[in-house]
Image (cartoon, grey):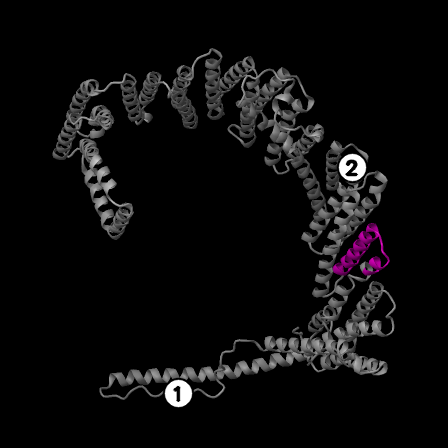
Amino acid sequence: MTNIPPPAEELRLLDAELRQLDARRAVLLRRREWLVHVLRTASAQRSVPGAGQMPPVWPVAPGAAAPRTEATAPGVQNVLLLLGGILLTVAAIAFTLVGWGHLGITGRALVLATVTLAALSAPVWLLRRGLGSTAEAVAALGMALTVLDAYALHEVAFDGSGGLGYAAAASAVLSAAWAAYGAAAGLLVPRSDAGSPTRSDRARAGAATAARPALRLPLPCAVVTAQVPLLLWALAVDAGPHTLTAVLLVTAAADTVVALRPAHAPVRIVGLVGACVAGALGVLSAGWLCWSASAPGAAAPGAALLLLAAAIALAAARYAPKPEVALCASLAAGLCLVAGAGGVLRAWLPGEWTVPGCLALGIALLTAVRTPLPRPVRQGVVGASLVVQGLAVLWTLPLVAGTLLGPVALIERPWSGTPLDIRDAVFQDAAWASYATAAPLVLAAVAGVLALAERRAVRRPASGVGALVLAWAAVVVTPVVLELPYGAGLVADGAVVVVALGVAERARRGTGGPSAPALTAVVLALVTSVTLALVSLATEAGTIAVLLALAALFAVASTRPGLVAFTAPAALAHATALACAAGASAGLRPEHTALLVLVVPAVAALVAARAARAGRSAAMVTVEAAGAGAALLALALAVTDLPVLASVLALCGVVTAGTALRPERRRAGHAAAALFLLAAWVRLAAWEVTTPEAYTLPVSVAALAVGHLRRRRDPSVSSWAAHGAGLSVTLVPSLLAMWGDPHWLRPLLLGTAALAVTLVGARSRLQAPLVLGGGTLALVALHELAPYIAQVVGVLPRWAPPALAGLVLLALGATYEQRLRDARRLREALGRLH
């Protein structure tokens, strides 16, 4: 509500402010001079013994320092004016609705007319005296009184007329009256300049005056009121949905004209908001009318309304002052065009061809690039085309996802029999969508658009990658859509894998290394190969043939150096699946199939060694990871048979030991030793040996002797490398046997041996004997105390264990810092051991 004053009044205010600033500056300069004098006097007095104290503070002149305020003067003014206007409006409403009956018809008319005319005339007088904010408040009161006048007139003279019709006419009259009032107020208030301004000052003042009316509220309020007359009229005459939609669009067109006119900002903002709201409601209503029609003739009116909305949006985009507004408006225009034509196509074509028809219309919008339209308008139309294409691609996603994920159900029933066709194999547990017939065409069309954009260097390489993915999706779903025979579908998917690998190799050669298209093609080949392997599970012969072909294909592709990090692990994964399928086909039990699977880790170790010699570290890591996965699968298959599990562990240890021969994989030797130990323990468990020491002690003695000799030759060797394996071979199996042994001899002998090992480790300051011996001794002691602990726990009441646990937790919490310090000291002490 703060009104900018005329130039003469604003100049007077600025001069007054400058005079106040000059006076304030003079007061501050005097204060500064006094402070300098006080500091000099204090310095002189400190140099003289017995000098007096600091003189009293110089009193500040009244009015020199204004107190801090928490609200600005314009803010206080606006609050007071707003409250005053609200109270007067409430009073007028109360008078009109409650106190109306105390006066006759003549008195009521005279009172309202007099008050309204006074409220509407006062702002002109106030503006001439520079009271702009007060004039705005009084003008708002006057406009509110005009609404009450319209209500009173209906109650007195037009009581028998319809409410909606009268409201439409009254809102139209009020809108026109408020607009005329706002324009007339600017003409009645004179514009004067103070002093003798220059020509440029007069030009700037004139431009500002022309862009800003004398009163700010009437014109925006008139635009807001103008939103409802047509809509109220349509409701009054019981218009149909098409007429109501047309009314909304005409209102949006009028608001667009207001928003594009060079009016002051509030009017443009109100017009823009009104155009957006009315246009959005009109477009939604027209779209519903068009797309819900059952015949082309019934859909035509709705399509015509959408074309009208598109024309309004396109005109707004053509004359919009800002590029962002033009882009959004042209985007909306393009979508309205496609929606209108698509609604007619939906009523004319079969249901599955509606989306392809809309896609064709969206692609046709790309011709706007060649038109002489402004750049923002062309960009918006192209954006609408991209939105339509994106929605069409989303429409195909259920079919693509079902094609890729549907064969997963065959894992539960492998080799169940040859399906009727490839669709039956893929969608055996899912319903087939009737609209999916046109999905490959949609994917291929969008892929073609992206390929053309990539050729013209538009957003490269994203366009090329998108074209590749969509073309792949179109080819993958085509056999399912065409219901090809089962064998032909397998061959088609295999061909997709071969072509994808060829595209990846070609893209790699073109760029001299792995690029986005090359990596995308490899990933697509991998995904297709997995789907193909799952689909082949329907028949035994198909599974073995497909897995063999895939393993060979990726093995051949691994001979190319660029993509071996992806193709070599894929070849190993398919070889692993082939080994499992071959074992099942031969009637082998799972634990015996595990021996076939172990061929894959051995091959992986050889391939990784070759990759290491060629300097391809990425390929080495991925190949070793694939080999480790195959080894874990073999262990899982053999876990039910202990003798076979021991053999598998031993073979895994051999492969790991061979890997440890490479200089960069020396640490794999520890894993090999652990595997050998596990193999030995599992073998002892398989033989049901009750005295494992007879087998482990000789090995431990030999291993400890070798470790001792190695440390004598090379003192830098860790005690874990020298003595860890030898001690573990005996201590761990003896511990396991001790927990099931009810006699006292084994715990006594094992505890004595563990104590001796611990003492040797402490005397020699060796970490491995100290940790292994001490841990074994603690476990033996726990084993011996376990019956007594159980007996004590059984005697105690039920509340005692929780209470004891709580005390322990409190004690641990109270000494947490000390425990951490002790742990750090122990770690440092162990770290100093050899």
Secondary structure that dominates the magenta span: helix
Circles 1 and 2: CB distance less than 8 Å?
A: no
Question: Which badge, 1 or 2, comes first in the chain's sequence?
Answer: 1
Determine the secondary structure under disc 1: loop
* Of the pair 748 and 162, the residue shown nearer to us: 748
Q: Is residue 141 visible?
A: yes
Determine the secondary structure under disc 2: helix
From the image, which quarter does the N terminus lie in? Answer: bottom right
The mark tally for this picture is: 2
Amino acid type assigned to the residue bearing label 2 in the image: Arg
Is 830 on the left or on the right of 529, as rendered?
left
Segment colored magenta: 232-260
Task: Judge depth for marks 1 and 2 and give the one in front.
Answer: 2
What is the crowding at mark 2: few (fewer than 14 residues within 10 Å), some, or many (at least 20)?
Answer: many
The quadrant where residue 9 appears: bottom right
Amino acid type assigned to the residue bearing label 1 in the image: Trp
The quadrant where residue 199 appears: bottom right
Q: Which residue is mark 1?
A: 58
Tell me the tag on residue 346: 2
- Looking at the image, is 600 positioned above or below residue 2? above
- Looking at the image, is 342 positioned above or below residue 265? above
- Looking at the image, is 328 positioned above or below residue 559? below
Please tell me whether residue 249 belongs to the stretch shown in magenta: yes
